[in-house]
Protein backbone atom coordinates (compact mmCIF):
# COMPACT_ATOMS: atom_id res chain seq x y z
CA UNK A 1 0.00 0.00 0.00
CA UNK A 2 2.78 2.46 0.90
CA UNK A 3 4.57 1.66 -2.37
CA UNK A 4 1.43 2.58 -4.33
CA UNK A 5 1.05 5.84 -2.48
CA UNK A 6 4.72 6.66 -3.00
CA UNK A 7 4.47 5.81 -6.74
CA UNK A 8 1.38 7.98 -7.02
CA UNK A 9 3.14 10.91 -5.33
CA UNK A 10 6.22 10.53 -7.55
CA UNK A 11 4.11 10.21 -10.70
CA UNK A 12 2.03 13.25 -9.75
CA UNK A 13 5.18 15.28 -9.09
CA UNK A 14 6.73 14.22 -12.43
CA UNK A 15 3.55 15.07 -14.35
CA UNK A 16 3.27 18.44 -12.62
CA UNK A 17 6.94 19.17 -13.34
CA UNK A 18 6.48 18.28 -17.02
CA UNK A 19 3.33 20.42 -17.22
CA UNK A 20 5.09 23.46 -15.73
CA UNK A 21 7.97 23.01 -18.17
CA UNK A 22 5.55 22.95 -21.10
CA UNK A 23 3.70 26.01 -19.80
CA UNK A 24 6.93 27.99 -19.33
CA UNK A 25 8.08 27.05 -22.86
CA UNK A 26 4.82 28.08 -24.57
CA UNK A 27 3.62 31.01 -22.45
CA UNK A 28 3.14 34.52 -23.83
CA UNK A 29 3.32 33.65 -27.50
CA UNK A 30 0.17 35.36 -28.79
CA UNK A 31 -0.49 38.66 -26.98
CA UNK A 32 1.25 41.07 -29.34
CA UNK A 33 -2.07 42.76 -30.28
CA UNK A 34 -3.15 43.46 -26.70
CA UNK A 35 -3.84 46.98 -25.40
CA UNK A 36 -3.24 48.40 -21.91
CA UNK A 37 -2.49 51.64 -20.09
CA UNK A 38 1.26 50.96 -19.86
CA UNK A 39 3.95 48.51 -20.85
CA UNK A 40 6.29 47.30 -18.12
CA UNK A 41 9.67 46.46 -19.61
CA UNK A 42 11.41 44.14 -17.19
CA UNK A 43 15.05 44.97 -16.66
CA UNK A 44 17.95 42.79 -17.62
CA UNK A 45 21.51 44.05 -17.44
CA UNK A 46 23.07 47.29 -18.58
CA UNK A 47 26.64 47.49 -19.70
CA UNK A 48 28.43 50.80 -19.13
CA UNK A 49 25.33 52.88 -19.81
CA UNK A 50 23.98 50.78 -22.69
CA UNK A 51 21.33 48.07 -22.47
CA UNK A 52 22.58 44.49 -22.67
CA UNK A 53 21.33 42.56 -25.72
CA UNK A 54 18.62 40.95 -23.56
CA UNK A 55 17.44 44.29 -22.17
CA UNK A 56 17.63 45.93 -25.59
CA UNK A 57 15.35 43.25 -27.04
CA UNK A 58 12.79 43.92 -24.32
CA UNK A 59 13.07 47.68 -24.78
CA UNK A 60 12.56 47.38 -28.54
CA UNK A 61 9.32 45.46 -27.94
CA UNK A 62 8.07 47.99 -25.39
CA UNK A 63 8.86 50.88 -27.72
CA UNK A 64 7.04 49.11 -30.54
CA UNK A 65 3.95 48.70 -28.34
CA UNK A 66 4.05 52.41 -27.52
CA UNK A 67 4.53 53.48 -31.14
CA UNK A 68 1.70 51.17 -32.27
CA UNK A 69 -0.64 52.91 -29.81
CA UNK A 70 -1.12 49.81 -27.68
CA UNK A 71 0.06 51.62 -24.52
CA UNK A 72 0.22 55.25 -23.41
CA UNK A 73 3.11 54.88 -20.98
CA UNK A 74 6.35 52.95 -20.90
CA UNK A 75 7.64 51.75 -17.53
CA UNK A 76 11.30 50.73 -17.55
CA UNK A 77 12.57 48.77 -14.58
CA UNK A 78 15.77 47.73 -12.93
CA UNK A 79 18.20 49.01 -10.35
CA UNK A 80 21.96 49.20 -10.34
CA UNK A 81 24.01 46.32 -9.10
CA UNK A 82 27.66 45.83 -8.26
CA UNK A 83 28.64 49.48 -8.11
CA UNK A 84 27.18 50.47 -11.47
CA UNK A 85 26.93 54.20 -12.11
CA UNK A 86 23.58 53.86 -13.89
CA UNK A 87 20.52 51.79 -13.12
CA UNK A 88 18.87 49.60 -15.71
CA UNK A 89 15.81 51.85 -15.45
CA UNK A 90 17.83 54.98 -16.24
CA UNK A 91 19.57 53.26 -19.16
CA UNK A 92 16.20 52.03 -20.42
CA UNK A 93 14.77 55.54 -20.29
CA UNK A 94 17.76 56.98 -22.15
CA UNK A 95 17.42 54.31 -24.82
CA UNK A 96 13.66 54.91 -25.20
CA UNK A 97 14.13 58.69 -25.48
CA UNK A 98 16.78 58.14 -28.17
CA UNK A 99 14.22 56.03 -30.05
CA UNK A 100 11.64 58.82 -29.98
CA UNK A 101 9.58 58.15 -26.84
CA UNK A 102 8.69 61.43 -25.03
CA UNK A 103 10.18 61.65 -21.53
CA UNK A 104 6.75 62.52 -20.12
CA UNK A 105 5.50 59.08 -21.16
CA UNK A 106 8.29 57.13 -19.45
CA UNK A 107 8.20 56.03 -15.83
CA UNK A 108 11.46 54.77 -14.33
CA UNK A 109 11.63 52.16 -11.59
CA UNK A 110 15.31 52.08 -10.60
CA UNK A 111 15.50 50.31 -7.24
CA UNK A 112 14.88 46.65 -8.06
CA UNK A 113 17.34 43.82 -8.51
CA UNK A 114 14.89 40.96 -9.18
CA UNK A 115 11.60 40.33 -10.98
CA UNK A 116 9.47 40.46 -7.83
CA UNK A 117 10.98 43.84 -6.93
CA UNK A 118 10.53 45.13 -10.52
CA UNK A 119 6.82 44.48 -10.23
CA UNK A 120 6.22 45.39 -6.58
CA UNK A 121 8.06 48.70 -6.98
CA UNK A 122 6.21 49.43 -10.23
CA UNK A 123 2.89 48.75 -8.56
CA UNK A 124 3.80 51.31 -5.86
CA UNK A 125 5.01 53.86 -8.45
CA UNK A 126 1.73 53.89 -10.37
CA UNK A 127 -0.56 54.29 -7.37
CA UNK A 128 -2.56 57.47 -7.78
CA UNK A 129 -1.99 57.59 -11.54
CA UNK A 130 -4.56 56.51 -14.08
CA UNK A 131 -2.62 53.36 -14.92
CA UNK A 132 -4.54 50.20 -14.17
CA UNK A 133 -3.62 47.68 -16.87
CA UNK A 134 -0.23 46.55 -18.12
CA UNK A 135 1.46 44.71 -20.92
CA UNK A 136 4.36 42.89 -19.31
CA UNK A 137 7.33 42.72 -21.69
CA UNK A 138 10.12 40.20 -21.33
CA UNK A 139 11.59 37.15 -22.98
CA UNK A 140 9.11 34.32 -23.51
CA UNK A 141 10.55 31.92 -20.94
CA UNK A 142 10.54 34.63 -18.23
CA UNK A 143 6.90 35.60 -18.70
CA UNK A 144 5.08 32.74 -16.97
CA UNK A 145 6.83 33.46 -13.69
CA UNK A 146 6.63 37.24 -14.10
CA UNK A 147 2.88 37.17 -14.77
CA UNK A 148 2.38 34.85 -11.81
CA UNK A 149 4.18 37.36 -9.56
CA UNK A 150 2.20 40.29 -11.00
CA UNK A 151 -1.08 38.46 -10.40
CA UNK A 152 -0.05 37.79 -6.79
CA UNK A 153 0.37 41.58 -6.51
CA UNK A 154 -3.17 41.99 -7.92
CA UNK A 155 -1.92 43.67 -11.10
CA UNK A 156 -3.97 43.48 -14.31
CA UNK A 157 -1.35 42.18 -16.76
CA UNK A 158 -1.02 40.47 -20.11
CA UNK A 159 2.26 38.97 -21.23
CA UNK A 160 4.02 40.10 -24.39
CA UNK A 161 7.08 38.11 -25.41
CA UNK A 162 9.70 40.22 -27.11
CA UNK A 163 10.17 39.41 -30.75
CA UNK A 164 13.71 40.75 -30.44
CA UNK A 165 14.98 38.25 -27.89
CA UNK A 166 18.71 37.73 -27.58
CA UNK A 167 17.90 34.07 -26.93
CA UNK A 168 17.81 32.79 -30.52
CA UNK A 169 19.79 29.55 -30.67
CA UNK A 170 19.01 26.40 -28.71
CA UNK A 171 22.41 26.92 -27.07
CA UNK A 172 21.17 30.17 -25.50
CA UNK A 173 17.50 29.24 -25.11
CA UNK A 174 17.94 25.99 -23.20
CA UNK A 175 19.91 27.31 -20.18
CA UNK A 176 17.54 30.30 -19.87
CA UNK A 177 14.49 28.01 -20.13
CA UNK A 178 15.86 25.60 -17.51
CA UNK A 179 16.62 28.49 -15.15
CA UNK A 180 13.16 29.99 -15.51
CA UNK A 181 11.49 26.60 -15.25
CA UNK A 182 13.33 25.93 -11.99
CA UNK A 183 12.43 29.38 -10.62
CA UNK A 184 8.79 28.99 -11.59
CA UNK A 185 8.55 25.48 -10.20
CA UNK A 186 10.19 26.64 -6.98
CA UNK A 187 7.76 29.58 -6.69
CA UNK A 188 4.81 27.23 -7.20
CA UNK A 189 5.98 24.66 -4.67
CA UNK A 190 6.73 27.29 -2.03
Image (cartoon, helix red, strand yellow):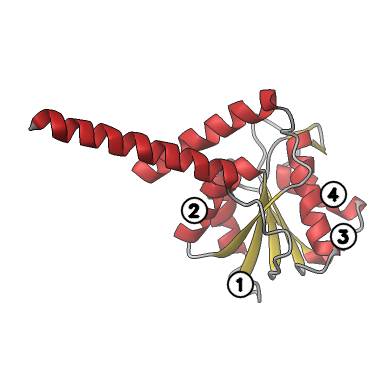
> Split into 4 quadrants, where in the image is the N terminus?
top left
Q: Of the numbered discs in the image, which one, if any, rests on residue 94?
A: 4
Please tell me how crowded label 1 is: few (under 14), some (14-19), or many (20+) other residues with Cα within 10 Å: some
Placement of 120 over or under 11, stated as above or below: below
Q: Which residue is rendered at x = 48% and y = 37% of the image?
A: 183
Mark closest to the chain's N terminus, 1 or 4: 4
| Residue 148: mark | 2
Precedes in sequence: disc 2 or disc 4: 4
Q: Earlier in the sequence, mark 3 or mark 2?
A: 3
Q: Nearer the viewer, mark 4 or mark 3?
A: 3
Quadrant in the picture for residue 79: top right
The residue sitting at 58% across, 49% down in the picture is: 27
Image coords of residue 124 (percent x, y): 56, 63
Q: Residues within 10 Å of mark 2 (few under 14, many from 20)?
A: some
Q: Which mark is residue 132?
A: 1
| Residue underneath mark 3 | 101
Q: CA distance from mark 1 to mark 3?
A: 21 Å
Crowding around mark 4 (Cα neighbors within 10 Å: few <14, some 14 to 19, many 20+) is some
Q: Secondary structure at mark 1?
A: loop
Give the CA distance from mark 3 to mark 2. 29 Å
Task: Estimate the spatial distance between the alpha carbons at disc 1 and disc 2, rounded to whole Å.
Answer: 17 Å
Marks 1 and 4 close (CB-CB < 8 Å): no
Amino acid sequence: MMKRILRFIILTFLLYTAYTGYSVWTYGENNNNSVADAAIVLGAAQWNGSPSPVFEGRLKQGIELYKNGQVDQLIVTGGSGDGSKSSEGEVGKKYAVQKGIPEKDIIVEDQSLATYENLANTESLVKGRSIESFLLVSDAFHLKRAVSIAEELKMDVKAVATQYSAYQSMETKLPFFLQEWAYYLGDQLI
